[in-house]
Amino acid sequence: MRTLIFGCGYLGQRVAAAWRDAGHSVYAVTRSTQRGEDLAQQGWNPVIADVCDPASLRDLPEVDLTL
């Protein structure tokens, strides 16, 4: 399953890790390139975007589930 997470704080990180460990492709939205690098090291696919900037959301990946 392909999942997309907006907000990788306390809860989002735990959900993302559980999905990753279950073999899902996890995409994590962040505004920060540095944070994106950190997310990639955890085995997630970072997506650099800002929910307050609609133009940055145009290229979101096609997923089965969004949190």
Image (cartoon, helix red, strand yellow):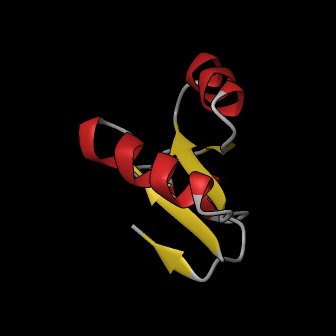
Q: Residue furthest left?
A: 10
- Relative height, residue 16 to residue 31 (above, below): below
Q: Is 2 left or right of 67, judged from the image as shown?
A: right
Say which quadrant the C terminus sits in.
Answer: bottom left
- Give the number of marks: 0
Q: Position of residue 59 (x, y in %)?
A: 73, 63
Residue drawn at x 47%, y 54% as measured from the top left: 18
What's the residue at 71%, 77% (across, down)? 62
| Identity of the residue furthest to the front in this view | 22
Q: Quadrant of the N terminus?
A: bottom right
Camera-nearest residue between 46 and 58:
46
In the rendered view, tell whether residue 50 sits above or below residue 3.
Answer: above
Q: 28 and 57: which one is in front?
A: 28
Q: Residue at x 52, y 38 (%)?
A: 30
Q: In terms of image quadrants, where is residue 55?
A: bottom right
List the single residue furthest toward the bottom. 64
What percent of the width, then of the height, locates residue 26?
Answer: 62, 57
Residue at 40% x, 41% y is 13
**In the image, residue 25 above or below residue 12:** below
The residue lying furthest to the top in this view is 34
